[in-house]
Amino acid sequence: MSPKLGFLVTLHAARGREDDVVAFLEAAERLMHAEPGTKQWFGFRVDATTFGIFDTFDTEPDRDTHLHGEVRKALEAHAELFDRPPVIAPVDLVGLKVGS
């Protein structure tokens, strides 16, 4: 089964906290190993202060579990890293190519 659902999350680092956001995303990636319903997880940087997360799920319950999971709790616990709240957009995947 190919994932059909996802989240696109936009994060804006507070001034001077960009390296801390990189470290946050690296730590968040390790949390994903405890979420079998998260099929793919990508942390990325758009520019100097804009970062993002893109992740995919097979089912709505898996996506909902992730929405209320450890990364969300970590985002809330480390709000000082960001100059505004994250934008968390649910997405429906219409095309997918992963792997070789």
Image (spheres, rainbow, N blue to C red):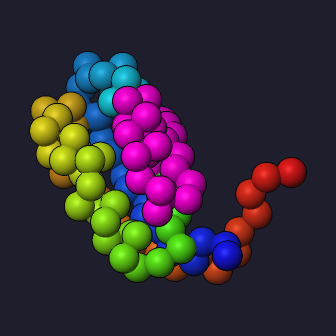
Report x, y in % for residue 79.
15, 39
Residue found at x 79% / y 52%? 99
How many marks can you see? Answer: 0
Residue found at x 50% / y 68%? 57
Q: 75 or 60, which lies in front? A: 60
> Left or right of 4: which side holds 22?
left
Q: What is the span of residues highlighted in magenta in the rendered image?
A: 26-53
Report x, y in % for residue 77.
13, 39
> Left or right of 95: which side holds 85?
left
Report x, y in % for residue 6.
48, 68
Let me know if residue 77 is in the magenta part: no
> Left or right of 96: which side holds 10?
left
Report x, y in % for residue 46.
50, 41
Residue found at x 30% / y 42%? 12
Vertical relation: 94 (above or below) 44:
below
Residue placed farthest to the right in the image? 100
Vertical relation: 25 (above or below) 60:
above
In the rendered view of the protein, which quadrant contains the N terminus?
bottom right
Q: 67 or 21, which lies in front? A: 67
> Does residue 17 appear in the picture of this structure?
yes
Corner quadrant of residue 75 = top left
> Does residue 51 appear in the picture of this structure?
no
Let me know if residue 33 is in the magenta part: yes
